[in-house]
Image (tube, rainbow, N blue to C red):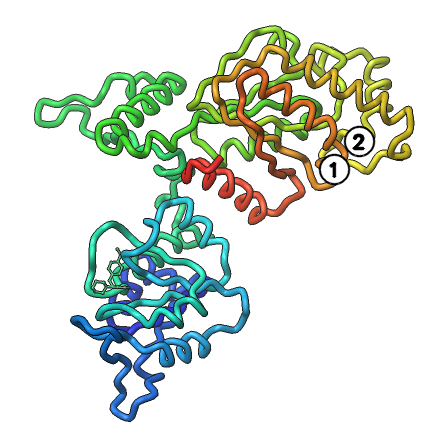
Amino acid sequence: MKFHVLTLFPEMIRNITETSIVGRAVKSNLIDVNTVNMRDFSVNRHMRVDDYPYGGGAGMVIEAEPVYRAIMSVKQHTDTRVIYMTPQAEVLNQTKVEELALEDEIIILCGHYEGIDERVLQECVTDYISIGDYVLTGGELGAAVLIDAVSRFVPGVLSNDESSQFESHQDNLLEYPHYTRPEKWHGHSVPGVLLSGDHRKIEEWRLEKSKERTLERRPDLLKKNFAVHSLWYGSEGFREAAGELTSKLSRYGELYDYNRRKLQKTIKYFGEKDLILIFLNRETDTGESRGEMSPKDEKARSAEKTSGELCGEKPQTGKHSEEENAKQNEAEASMKERFRNLRGKNTHCIFIYGGQEQKQELEAEAEVFSRFLMKKGFRKPEEFMFHMDMNEKEKNMCALKIRSLADNEKF
Ligand code: 4H6
């Protein structure tokens, strides 16, 4: 990953990016930090890049032209993101950091004095980012913060010991407290549950502590925290996809196998703090579970499931043939039957399709199913695509889009 930093104080950026983990990553060529001194692009014979503000007032403003030339000197692709570090922007968060980590190259623009002439910003800047609600003398510390946070997601930058499988801000919950030896220190013991060896109990305790701590220290984050529930049915391929997407969204997400009649018969209540993912497909439900299916059932099933698999083919039948209509009605009925015991209360839900073709194929059923869910107290479902044939980047992008919906409460 390559960062171009446009600044009037390149030394500030170098000092930070030449040391520590970021420094190590630069040395091993995992990341590249290219600092550009905008003064080199001055259009003035005194090498000045600033001038008095139109309309009067204190301070100086950086001229548009040197900034424009500096950007153009490093910008090789029309779609490279140009980020302006400014206190007048949305505050950086973990979702945004991970989203930026998917880019190959970014340009970071650091302002100084009173800022930069608005016209070059309008023409070139794609993202405005603040690192917090306070004022600094320049954007350089912000750029350094951004480079550090983004670099952590570049493969190889963190060693196994340094990287955590789950990010503490992934769920918009603060991290639970950590303890190491000795067991007793200054008269304080390590919480007993951590010594119990009962992993389920430990996970429960950690989630509880995370929630307690978030409520106490960052109650604003709790609004953005959702308990993720993934409902899947059909073949094992869907379980795999559901498992993978769920773990990208939450450390505490849960999977529900809706092939199971027992689960279908139980009334499930979800609230406003739940997020339900439903992995849609067109496999009709026959046995209690796949393991218990008779060979005859299996045959019938595979005959009718041509369109249901994650990366399946389009159905052979004509679009509005009677056969197709009958199939559609049957599929709608089976979807409703399978999920008839779901209850929501303003609950957010998302339909996940196995691909573009699946999405088109299931369009009509999904529409009916969506109205059915809304009657049961769910909000209108959002739609996303996720399947095992997507590459890691595409999968992460899908998870990040869902996370950013939750972060911005823009469901
Ligand atoms: C752009 C516009 C970022 C950049 C104005 C930058 C805080 C953050 C700056 C300014 C920054 C942040 C110049 C305004 C000095 C105040 C540089 N401050 N300023 N929170 N300062 O990310 O005067």
Q: Position of residue 26 (x, y in %)?
A: 38, 65
Q: Position of residue 378 (x, y in %)?
A: 54, 21
Q: Which mark is residue 389?
A: none
Looking at the image, the residue that sits furthest to the front is: 55
- Residue 70 in sight in this render: yes
Disc 1 is placed on an element classified as helix
| Nearer to us in this view, 160 or 341 | 341
Residue 169 vs residue 11: left or right?
Answer: right
| Nearer to us in this view, 170 or 128 | 128
For badge 2, the amino acid type reads Ser
Residue at the spot x=40%, y=72% of the render?
120
Looking at the image, the residue that sits furthest to the left is: 186
Tell me if the residue at label 2 has its CB under 8 Å from ligand 1. no
User: Where does label 2 land, which residue?
Assistant: 307
Q: Is residue 377 above or below residue 20?
A: above
Quadrant of the rendered structure where residue 338 is?
A: top right
Q: CA distance from mark 2 to mark 1?
A: 11 Å
Q: Is residue 99 above or below residue 301?
A: below
Disc 2 is placed on an element classified as loop
Q: Earlier in the sequence, mark 2 or mark 1?
A: 2
Q: Is residue 203 above or below residue 50?
A: above
For badge 1, the amino acid type reads Gln
- Asked if disc 2 and disc 1 are in contact, CB closer than 8 Å, the reply is no
Q: Position of residue 362 (x, y in %)?
A: 73, 31
Quadrant of the rendered structure where residue 257 is?
A: top right
Looking at the image, the residue that sits furthest to the bottom is: 45
**Where does ligand 1 appear, by image quarter?**
bottom left
The mark closer to the camera, 2 or 1, is 1
Residue at the spot x=31%, y=67% of the render?
110
| Nearer to us in this view, 181 or 43 | 43
Q: Which mark is residue 360?
A: 1
Quadrant of the rendered structure where residue 408 is?
A: top left
